[in-house]
Image: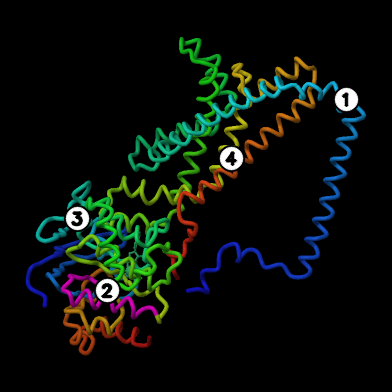
Amino acid sequence: MADQTPVIELRHVDKHYGDLHVLQDINLTVHKGEVLVLIGPSGSGKSTLCRTINRLETIDSGEILIEGEPLPQEGKALAQMRAEIGMVFQSFNLFAHKTILQNVTLGPIEVLGIPKAEAASRAMELLRRVGVDAQAAKVPAQLSGGQQQRVAIARSLAMQPKAMLFDEPTSALDPEMINEVLEVMVELAREGMTMVVVTHEMNFARRVSNRVVFMADGQIVEENTPDEFFDHPKTARARDFLDSIKGH
Amino acid sequence: MSAHTMSMRDALYEAPGPRTKRLTVIGTIVSLALVCVGLALVVRQFYVTGQLDAKYWAFFARPTTWLYLLNGFVGTVKVAAMAAVISLVLGVLLMLARTSGIKPLAFVARVIIDFFRGVPSLLLIYFFYLGLPTVGIRMSPFWMITIPVALAASGVLAEVFRAGVNAVPKGQTEAALSIGLTPGKTMFKIVLPQALRIVIPSLISQLVVVVKDTTVAYVVSYPDLMQNGRVLITTNDAVVSVYLVTAVIYILVNYAINQLSISMARRSGNPIISRTTENPT
Ligand SMILES: Nc1ncnc2c1ncn2[C@@H]1O[C@H](COP(=O)(O)OP(=O)(O)OP(=O)(O)O)[C@@H](O)[C@H]1O
Ligand SMILES: [Mg+2]
C-alpha cells in the first residue's frame, strides 16, 4: 500500500536534555500510506522522537522535513504545519471544558476557518465513524478512557492531517477498552493514513504495520518488517526487549 | 481506572461513623448555645448602655436616611465594580506578561506585581490623593479611590491567575498546539478558561477584598456607603446603630457577590469539570 513519496523525514537529528543524549543521529523516513511502529524500552526516546515531528520538542541539530519542506520553527507557519500532522496522546488530553462535539469542531473552526454548522456536521460524521456520536453533548470526564481516546482520534482527523502520530495510545486504557481504540486505528491504516505509532501492542504491529523501528538509548538499533523483527530479531538488545515484553 | 478516580475530598474525609456523628451533634449544640449566650450578652450590654434607646433608631424610620444610605451604597457599588473590572483586566495582562517567556517583560511584570501586592492599599490611596496633585495630576474622588484599589487587587489577581494557569495540565496546551492553534489562541481558548474555573474561589475572596478596600473612600471624601454612614453618625449622634446597619449591608453585598460568582461559574459552561482525562495511571 505504501508508495515511495516521503511524508516525514528526519535527517541526523540530535537532541539533548542536559547531559542526556536523548536522540542520537536519528535518520528515519516515513512514506505516504506507511504505518510505522516505534518500539523500545522505557526512556529510549520514543516519545521525544514523536514529539519532535510536530515540534512539541525542539531539536539541537539535524533536519526534519514534512513533504520535503523543512519544519517551520515558529509562528503561523509552524501552527499550520502542526495542523497537518495529527497527534494522539497517551492521556487523551481532550479539552476538559468543552463538549465532545466542541473538542472536534474547535480546530476546524479556529484554524481552518470552516463555518460552524459545516464543522459540526463533519464532526458528527467523524464521531459516528469512531462510534461515539451518542456522546457528542457530554464533556470528556463523562466518557470512558476508550471513548475519550476515540474522540481524540476524531479530533485529529477533523484537521484532515497528512500524517498522524500516536504516542502509546492504548497504554492508559483498561484492557477491555484497548481493542476498541486499536480497531479505529486499524481502520485508519486500511484507508491509507500515514501513521507513526509508539506502541507495545505486538498484534497490532504485526497486523497493520509496514515497518517496525526499534529504539534503545536514543538510537535506532534495528528496523525491519514486523514479522522479521518479532520472529528473528537481529540484535541482542531487541531480543532482550522482546523477551521482557512477552511476559505480558 | 474507576478505582483511581476517587476524588481528593473522598480521600481526605472518611464518611462519618456513628461516633463522629454523635460528636458532630454535640458540637453543633454546644456552639449554638455559645453563640446565643454571646448574642444575649451583647444585647444586654447595648440595653444597659442605652444603645437600644429609641433616639438612636428613630431616624431609620425616615425615608431620607435610607435614601442617603442608598446613595452611599450606589457609590460603593460603582467604585467596587469599576475597580473589579480594571483589576481583572490588569491582572490578566500582568500574568500574561509575567509568563510570556520574554525575560525583560517578565521581570518588569514581576516587579509591578510584587509592588502592588506588597504595598497597603491605603498608602496607594494617599499617594493618589496627596502625592499626585503635587506633580499636577488631578482626578475626581471617584478615580482617586478606584484606581488605587484596582491596582492593589491587580497584583494579587495576577498571581491568582498564574497559579490557575499553572494548574491546567500541560497536555491541554500540547493538544491545542497539535491541532494548529497558535500559542495565543491556546492561552485564550484552552488554558485561561480552565484556569479561571480553577481560581473562582480565590477570585471571589479578592472581589470581597475590593469591596472592603473601598470603605476607605472617606479619605478622598468620595460618598460611598461608609462615608455616608459616617455623616449619618455625626448628624444623628448615633454610632452603634448606624455601624450595625452599615455592616449588615456590606455583609449582604459580599454575600451577593458570592452567590453571583457561583451562579456565573455554573452558567459559564459545563457542570462537570474534572481532571480524570489527565494522568490516568
Ligand atoms: N522534559 C524533559 N527533561 C529532561 N529529561 C527528559 C524530558 N523528557 C524526557 N526526558 C528523558 O528523556 C528520556 C527519553 O524520554 P522519552 O519520554 O522520549 O522515552 P520513551 O521512550 O517515550 O519512554 P516511555 O516508554 O517510558 O514512554 C528519558 O530518560 C526521560 O527521562
Ligand atoms: Mg513515551
Instruction: Report the Cα–Cα distance between label 2 and label 3.
Output: 28 Å
Residue A14 visible, this angle: no
Instruction: Give the residue pinned by disc 1.
Output: B53
Report the span colored magenta. Answer: A177-198
**Left or right of B165 in this view: A132:** left
Instruction: Give the residue pinned by disc 4.
Output: B257
Category of crowding for the residue at label 1, using alpha-carbon neighbours closer than 10 angstroms: few (below 14), some (14–19), many (at least 20): few
Residue A81 numbered mark, or none: 3
Category of crowding for the residue at label 3, using alpha-carbon neighbours closer than 10 angstroms: few (below 14), some (14–19), many (at least 20): many
> Viewer-nearest of labels 4 and 1?
1
As helix, strand or loop, the secondary structure at mark 2 comes to strand
Instruction: Report the Cα–Cα distance between label 1 and label 3.
Output: 79 Å
Instruction: Give the residue pinned by disc 2.
Output: A216
> Viewer-nearest of labels 4 and 3?
4
**Left or right of A229 in this view: A243:** right
**Magenta region includes residue B222:** no
Image quarter hosting the C terminus of chain A: bottom left
> Viewer-nearest of labels 4 and 2?
4
**Magenta region includes residue A180:** yes
Residue at 77 percent across and 65 percent down: it is B21
Indicate the position of residue A52 as horizontal and vertical percent values: 24, 60
The single residue placed furthest to the right in the displayed view is B48
Instruction: Report the Cα–Cα distance between label 4 and label 1.
Output: 34 Å
Q: In this rendering, do the residues under marks 1 and 3 share a single chain? A: no
**Left or right of A202 in this view: B97:** right
> Identity of the amino acid at label 4?
Ile
> Identity of the amino acid at label 3?
Met
Category of crowding for the residue at label 2, using alpha-carbon neighbours closer than 10 angstroms: few (below 14), some (14–19), many (at least 20): many
